[in-house]
Image (spheres, rainbow, N blue to C red):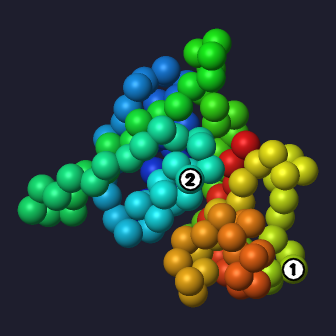
Amino acid sequence: MDTIGDFLTRIRNAGMARHEKVDIPSSNVRVGIAKVLKDSGYIKNYKVVKDGKQGMMRVYLSYNGSGKHIIEKLQRVSKPGRRFYVNSNDIPNPKSGYGLAILSTNKGILSGRQALENKVGGELLCTVW
């Protein structure tokens, strides 16, 4: 099962249904992706609640003034059946800088800009715009 793909799909579906928040099972990778999305302004906030098992993460979605979800497209790039790795020189720049690439590197989950500044490559998890 693709847990990252499930995480992205839940956010995408909740945004299309105009929900204020969505609850998702938590993991370290999902928390890292949520942190990058929050720092970039694509979501309002997220909270992780320990429940004695895996834990739950509540993601608060962000909308623009007209009520449209800020995330227009949330696309999984690297999948369990086909991993996609990039060097620091080959990090994509979605929508000519208006989008965001999220990578899993040896320095943790980073945005494309952060990975470029640190000159590290890694697995390209998803792109957002």
Q: Specify whether residue 31 is in view.
A: yes
- Residue type at the position of mark 2: Asp
Q: Residue at x 69, y 70 (%)?
A: 114
Location of residue 106 in the rendering, given as x and y in whole percent from the top left corner: 57, 87
Q: Nearer the viewer, residue 19 or 39?
A: 39
Horizontally, residue 111 falls left or right of residue 13, namely right
- Furthest-top residue in this view: 66
Vertical side of 34 occupied by 28: above or below:
below
- Furthest-left residue in this view: 52
Q: Are marks 1 and 2 in contact (CB under 8 Å)?
A: no
Which residue bears the numbered disc 2?
39
Q: Specify whether residue 78 is in view.
A: no
Judge the density around disc 1: few (<14), some (14-19), many (≥20) Cα neighbours within 10 Å.
Answer: few
Horizontally, residue 83 falls left or right of residue 39, namely right
- Residue type at the position of mark 1: Asn
Horizontally, residue 100 falls left or right of residue 46, namely right
Q: Quadrant of residue 125?
A: bottom right
Location of residue 128 in the rendering, given as x and y in whole percent from the top left corner: 69, 48
Mark 1 falls on what kind of element? helix
Mark 2 falls on what kind of element? helix
Vertical side of 44 occupied by 79: above or below:
below
Q: Residue at x 14, y 63 (%)?
A: 53
Q: Quadrant of residue 48?
A: bottom left
Q: What's the distance in space between the residues labelled 1 and 2, CA to CA?
A: 23 Å
> Which numbered disc, 1 or 2, marks the residue closer to the eye?
2
Location of residue 93 in the rendering, given as x and y in whole percent from the top left corner: 84, 59
Q: Nearer the viewer, residue 20 or 17?
A: 20
Judge the density around disc 2: few (<14), some (14-19), many (≥20) Cα neighbours within 10 Å.
Answer: few
Which residue bears the numbered disc 1?
89
Looking at the image, tell me whether mark 1 or mark 2 is earlier in sequence order.
2
Q: Quadrant of residue 86?
A: bottom right
Location of residue 91 in the rendering, given as x and y in whole percent from the top left corner: 81, 71
